[in-house]
């Protein structure tokens, strides 16, 4: 576009220079459009003028607030405008000036809102003003034009002029200037030309806004040469470009990424003594981002002056950038903000940024990711906390609950009141299921709902629609204790004035105590209803105590004290009740009810009642008061109407309840659901089917959860067609609903059981799982049952195929248990060679050794020494030599080959692991295998370095359990023969057994056995000291307060007293100690933790990290190198592996060449010995630190032939940094490794495609997919949703998806 090709415009500008009105009021008004500083200044004047002119009293403070906000921050919030608008809407005497102000506040002064929302707001305001008949002149229409332009709203200038003509309003110079700006904004040459001609026709002077509009029109549409020509024309006409003119030209260069053009424009302005303000430079930053050149924004940062008000200008820009999706640029510019002494340095620093993330409706995952990045980069230290608070304020329930989990990860304790806004939101929406789900989530998060939560935010919504008993049942289902549910429902009923219903609840559930909570609502209810009988019944229940059949003297004394306190509490309540009732007959009725229930009151309360009654006191009342204060008065037992059912009602009971409720015309949906669940639990297929038909004929709606339950039920019962019908019904109503993996495995198992194996395979392929595998015992057990069923049928091909499918499609992680059927199926067929081949594959591919012991025993029984040696060598590579030698010892013992077992135990240098032998003994006891224990005892005879006392003891236990008393006594004799001293534990156990059999005990029984001592040592602190949970909470609190040393001291003390704190808190404590480089404290704890606990709390990792953080990484690696040089056994190597630094420690030394070199050397040596994990970890850090040469060297030497490659951290970091190049490097490396499975390669390609889709780089995503297919990848190798997401993105963009997988 070039408006300067016609010489008439040059002549027009030259002539216009003579008529240009400089510094006039009109020019100042026009400047508002393109100079936001002028706009703010003008608004300041306008607001001050309007706020002191004629107006309603209530509008004044709101207008003053707007004035203050604009001056302080250069922006206002939509809430501020809404408040003013609501006030205007409620008044009829709004002035024209006030309405003009509100219109002007709907543009760029509200940067937190999307332009579309601001436009809707101004149109809403305009409509109200029009309906009210508020007088509006051309200035109102010009203000509306300005808002439309700032919001980039699409409108027709021609129709706008027609509207003015209808209203009889004459457009002025400002009107045409703004229409001119609009045409240039759209790049409409013809429209801009017509406006220029019209202005010339009307003899309007050419002012700066017109020229700036032309510069913008050229520059923003790629014609920067044309924009420069406008500047030259201005100079020829005697007009000097302003800072705004140069800014618009620089923004044009920025939009197309010409950073040199930007710099030259800024320098040209400087040479002309026209200084570009911070706001101008920030506009350039904005257009660099809009043009997709975010990598160049930092090059203009040196031009920033950071004058007064800079931080607020940056805030405004960040809000706009976030609205437009330029988060990276927003973070970069945020880093330039200088620290101030005001709110920016409070715990809520950067809150505006996080609030905006929530406002633009990003997904929960992306918001969490952004908050994590903001926290890690130090921009918003409390980003997660701020996001949580605002999600609660905004009613964003799902987001808030996701953020709660992140808070817990950060060690922040969730509090009751965090959930209150969520509960209020669900209550307002009348979403009962959502309300109850939040309660369940609270329990799952360890935040049990307290009475205040239940009474104020839950029960009021539930009690409106259901009976109190059902409300209590619903709360129970949500893990709220029964008594807590009943007590708070009772209080809620009292507050509603439903005293009788409250009394029914009290009698049914017996919520005792809590006078303080119950007194006020109970008295208020009495005041409303005068229901004395119910009042007394509730007070009776509250005062009652549990039934005790036998009490000792001390307990009686305690109960006496409780009775005295009860009398005081009851007396206070009755005293207040008498004042409420006031009439003597009602008071007599109340006191009579109290007496009949044995409710006593204290003397002080009786005297106060008597004094209050005064002349109304009667003989009867006096007698009653005397009786109520008598020490002989005994509390009557409460007559309960509690249901006797101790568990959920049976199907038969529910059938009766359903029939009764139907006859009464009640809503029976809840009971129908309970009945269906009961049929399912009772596995009554006939009833389930018939009842379902009945439900489908009624208005009962089957929810996705119920249908999923039915799907699982039918799968368990091999009714596949019915299960598929349930699934189809779910998808028809809820297309996004997904069945969990447990149900999918149930269906696959059903297909296998019904001899539809091929369908099962296809079903599992069609439902391929996402990357992360999160399973529990029940799920793993079901997968094993599926594979084992095929193994039992001796169908090896199917077992192999299905196992591979389940692993590659992310259904299950390979483990010895899951891989066991692969070996079992061959052993059942007596095909040891195939079993060994499969075992080798498991070792190489998964580093697992399934059925190792069974294979050893099979080879021992076949006396195949060569294959047994081969099996041992293969297993040694994974478990180490010492462990495998112990496995062989036990295998020989179990096969009765005691000589061979003993020969191994006699091996010179053999390091016996007592724990392995103890574990084996325990297993033999559980299995009742006394012959194995006898063999182990024989094999270890006269081997002094083996502690045989446990073998003797476990063999004794086995004999006693089998009632082999003679053998048990004989064992005691053998101990004497072999010169072994029986342990106290042995003698105590044997004596108890002999006494139980009425046999003589031929030895002196120890007075106190080790078992008793151990029990005493463990239980005594529990009785007198803090519990495990209390200690854990204490440790956690101390860590959160920064007192990590004290926290560890408490932990060590707890270990000394036999109480082990929760591993999660110990791990958290170690993490903090590692961050503080507190090596000594970590080492102190190491003396107390077992090997198992050491692994769970990642003790060695944290210790190494602390050493590295302290700067001792070099010495640590020297120690490892020395140990490596002296290592002679696999156990030595295993110890070294635990001490090798992990990701965080390695990342911290990437610039420390000395330590890095030593880590590299150790990693290479370990890799040469078959342990590639250290090299793998170091390689990932090389890649993430852009050390390409070191990464390539390490890969080629140590990892190119590795059996498995770890790369999850690399993928995660790539996504967090939004750096696809790291995944590209990973893919290139994986392709060079011949051992890489297509599933692993598919995972990497999937992540890369997803990243490009998220960044809207569809062409790149398409190229990556093509490369993946060329590598031989098929649909089943990609992550489940990858291709669907890409296809959806293509459809949304209106492009054709050319691939068929």
Image (spheres, rainbow, N blue to C red):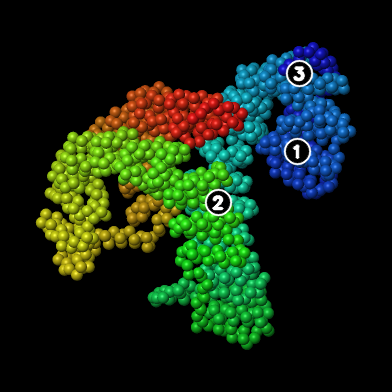
- Residue at mark 1: 122
Q: Quadrant of residue 576?
A: bottom right
Residue 888 coordinates in the image, percent (x, y): 21, 42
Q: Above or below — where is 923 with respect to 616?
A: above
Q: Secondary structure at mark 2?
A: loop
Mark 3 is surrounded, within 10 Å at the Cα level, by few (under 14), some (14 to 19) or many (20 or more) other residues, namely some
Q: Is residue 1169 visible?
A: yes
888 vs 609, left or right, is left
Q: Residue at x 14, y 55 (%)?
A: 980
Residue 1254 coordinates in the image, percent (x, y): 55, 32
Q: Above or below — where is 267 with respect to 702?
A: above
- Residue at mark 2: 703
Q: Above or below — where is 1172 with respect to 814?
A: above
Residue 240 is marked as 3
Q: CA distance from mark 2 to mark 3?
A: 72 Å
Q: Residue at x 17, y 50 (%)?
A: 935
Q: Closest to the observer: 35 or 925? A: 925
Q: Residue furthest right?
A: 168
Mark 3 vs mark 1: give the one in front: 1
């Amino acid at each position: 576009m070039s408006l300067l090709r016609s010489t008439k415009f040059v002549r027009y500008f030259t002539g216009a220079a003579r008529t240009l009105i400089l510094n006039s009021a009109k020019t100042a008004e026009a400047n508002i459009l393109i100079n936001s500083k002028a706009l703010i200044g003008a608004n300041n004047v306008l607001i001050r003028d309007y706020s002191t002119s004629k107006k309603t009293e209530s509008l004044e403070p709101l207008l003053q607030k707007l004035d203050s906000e604009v001056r302080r921050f250069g922006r206002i919030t939509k809430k501020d405008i809404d408040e003013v608008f609501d006030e205007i809407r409620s008044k009829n005497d709004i002035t024209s000036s006030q309405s003009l102000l509100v219109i002007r506040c709907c543009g760029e002064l509200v940067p937190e809102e999307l332009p579309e929302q601001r436009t809707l707001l101004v149109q809403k305001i305009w409509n109200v003003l029009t309906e009210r008949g508020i007088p509006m002149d051309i200035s109102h229409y010009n203000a509306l034009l300005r808002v439309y332009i700032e919001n980039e709203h699409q409108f027709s200038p021609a129709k706008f002029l027609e509207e003015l003509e209808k209203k009889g309003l004459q457009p002025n110079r400002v009107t045409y200037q703004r229409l001119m700006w609009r045409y240039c904004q759209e790049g409409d040459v013809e429209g801009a030309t017509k406006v220029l001609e019209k202005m010339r026709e009307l003899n309007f002077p050419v002012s700066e806004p017109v020229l700036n509009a032309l510069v913008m029109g050229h520059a923003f549409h790629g014609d920067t040469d044309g924009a420069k020509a406008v500047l030259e024309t201005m100079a020829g006409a005697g007009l000097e470009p302003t800072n705004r003119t140069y800014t618009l030209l620089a923004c044009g260069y920025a939009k197309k990424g010409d950073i040199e053009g930007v710099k030259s424009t800024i320098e040209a302005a400087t040479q002309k003594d026209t200084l570009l303000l911070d706001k101008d430079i920030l506009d350039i930053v904005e257009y660099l981002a809009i043009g997709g050149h975010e990598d160049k924004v930092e090059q203009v940062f040196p031009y920033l002056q950071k004058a007064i008000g800079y931080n607020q200008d940056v805030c405004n820009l960040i809000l706009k950038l976030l609205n437009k999706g330029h988060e990276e640029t927003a973070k970069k510019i945020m880093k330039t903000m200088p620290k101030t002494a005001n709110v920016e340095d409070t715990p809520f620093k950067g809150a505006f940024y996080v609030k905006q993330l929530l406002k633009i409706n990003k997904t929960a995952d992306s918001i969490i990711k952004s908050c994590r990045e903001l926290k890690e980069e130090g921009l918003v230290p409390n980003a997660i906390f701020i996001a949580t608070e605002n999600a609660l304020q905004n009613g964003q329930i799902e987001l808030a609950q996701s953020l709660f989990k992140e808070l817990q990860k950060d060690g922040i304790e969730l509090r009751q009141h965090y959930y209150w806004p969520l509960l209020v939101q669900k209550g307002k929406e009348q979403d009962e299921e959502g309300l109850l789900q939040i309660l369940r989530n609270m329990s799952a998060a360890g935040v049990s709902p307290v009475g205040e939560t239940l009474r104020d935010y839950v029960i009021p919504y539930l009690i409106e629609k259901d009976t109190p008993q059902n409300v209590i049942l619903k709360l129970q289902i949500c893990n709220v204790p029964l008594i807590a549910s009943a007590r708070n429902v009772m209080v809620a009923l009292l507050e509603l004035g439903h005293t009788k219903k409250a009394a029914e609840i009290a009698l049914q559930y017996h919520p005792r105590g809590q006078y303080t909570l119950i007194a006020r609502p109970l008295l208020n209810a009495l005041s409303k209803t005068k229901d004395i009988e119910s009042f007394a019944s509730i007070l009776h229940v509250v005062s009652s105590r549990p039934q005790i059949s036998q009490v000792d003297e001390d307990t009686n004394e305690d109960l006496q004290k409780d009775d005295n306190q009860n009398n005081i509490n009851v007396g206070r309540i009755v005293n207040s009740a008498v004042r409420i009732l006031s009439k003597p007959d009602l008071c007599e009725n109340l006191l009579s009810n109290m007496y009949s229930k044995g409710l006593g009151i204290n003397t002080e309360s009786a005297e106060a009642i008597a004094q209050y009654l005064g002349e109304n006191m009667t003989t009867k009342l006096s007698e009653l008061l005397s009786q109520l204060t008598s020490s002989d008065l005994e509390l009557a037992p409460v007559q309960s109407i509690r249901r006797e059912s101790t568990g959920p009602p049976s199907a038969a009971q529910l059938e009766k309840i359903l029939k009764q409720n139907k006859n009464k015309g009640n809503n029976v949906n809840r009971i129908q659901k309970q009945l269906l669940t009961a049929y399912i639990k009772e596995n009554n297929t006939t009833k389930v089917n018939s009842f379902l038909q009945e439900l489908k004929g009624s208005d009962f709606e089957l929810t996705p959860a119920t249908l999923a339950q039915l799907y699982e039920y039918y799968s368990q019962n091999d009714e596949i067609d019915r299960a598929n019908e349930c699934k189809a019904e779910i998808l028809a109503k809820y297309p996004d609903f997904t069945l969990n993996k447990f149900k999918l495995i149930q269906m696959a198992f059903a297909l296998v059981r019904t001899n539809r194996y091929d369908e099962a395979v296809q079903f599992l392929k069609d439902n391929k799982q996402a990357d992360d595998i999160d399973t529990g015992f029940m799920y793993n057990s079901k997968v094993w049952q599926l594979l084992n069923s095929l193994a039992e049928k001796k169908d090896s091909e199917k077992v192999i195929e299905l196992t591979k499918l389940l692993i590659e499609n992310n259904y299950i992680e390979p483990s010895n248990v899951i891989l066991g059927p692969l070996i079992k199926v061959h052993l059942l067929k007596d095909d040891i060679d195939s079993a060994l081949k499969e075992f080798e594959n498991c070792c190489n591919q998964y580093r697992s050794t399934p059925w190792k012991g069974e294979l050893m025993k099979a080879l021992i029984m076949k006396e195949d020494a060569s294959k047994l040696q081969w099996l041992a060598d293969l297993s040694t590579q994974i478990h180490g030599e010492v462990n495998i030698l112990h496995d062989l010892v036990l295998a020989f013992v179990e096969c009765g080959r005691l000589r061979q077992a003993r020969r191994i135990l006699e091996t010179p240098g053999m390091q016996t692991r007592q724990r392995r032998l103890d574990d084996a003994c325990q297993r033999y006891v559980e299995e009742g295998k006394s012959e194995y224990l006898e063999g182990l005892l024989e094999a270890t005879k006269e081997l002094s370095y083996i502690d045989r006392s446990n073998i003797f003891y476990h063999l004794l236990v086995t004999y006693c359990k089998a009632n082999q008393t003679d053998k048990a006594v004989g064992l005691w004799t053998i101990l004497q023969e072999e010169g072994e001293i029986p342990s106290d534990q042995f003698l105590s156990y044997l004596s108890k057994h002999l006494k139980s059999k009425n046999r003589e005990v031929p030895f002196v029984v120890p007075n106190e056995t080790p078992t008793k001592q151990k029990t005493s040592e463990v239980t005594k602190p529990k009785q007198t000291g803090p519990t495990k949970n209390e200690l854990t909470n204490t440790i956690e609190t101390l860590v959160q307060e920064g007192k990590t040393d004290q926290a560890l001291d408490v932990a060590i003390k707890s270990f000394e007293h036999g109480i082990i704190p929760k591993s999660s808190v110990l791990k958290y404590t170690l993490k903090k100690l590692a961050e503080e480089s507190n090596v000594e404290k970590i080492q102190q704890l190491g003396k107390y933790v077992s090997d198992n606990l050491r692994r769970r709390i990642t003790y060695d990792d944290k210790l190494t990290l602390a050493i590295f953080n302290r700067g001792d990484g070099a010495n640590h690696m020297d120690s490892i190198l020395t140990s490596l040089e002296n290592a002679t056994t696999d156990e030595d190597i295993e110890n070294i592996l635990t001490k090798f630094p992990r990701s965080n420690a390695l990342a911290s030394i990437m610039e420390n060449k000395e330590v890095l070199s030593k880590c590299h050397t150790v990693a290479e040596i370990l890799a040469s010995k078959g342990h590639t994990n250290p090299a793998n970890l170091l390689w990932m850090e090389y890649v993430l630190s852009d050390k390409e040469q070191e990464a390539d060297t390490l890969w080629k030497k140590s990892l190119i032939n590795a059996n498995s490659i770890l790369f999850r951290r690399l993928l995660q970091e790539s996504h967090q940094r939004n750096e696809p190049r790291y995944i590209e490097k990973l893919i290139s490396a994986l392709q060079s490794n011949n051992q890489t499975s297509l599933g692993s390669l598919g995972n990497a390609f999937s992540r890369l495609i997803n990243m490009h889709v998220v960044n809207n780089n569809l062409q790149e995503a398409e190229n990556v997919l093509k490369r993946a297919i060329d590598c031989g990848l098929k649909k089943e190798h990609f992550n489940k949703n990858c291709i669907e997401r890409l296809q959806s993105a293509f459809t949304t963009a209106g492009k054709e998806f050319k691939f068929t997988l």
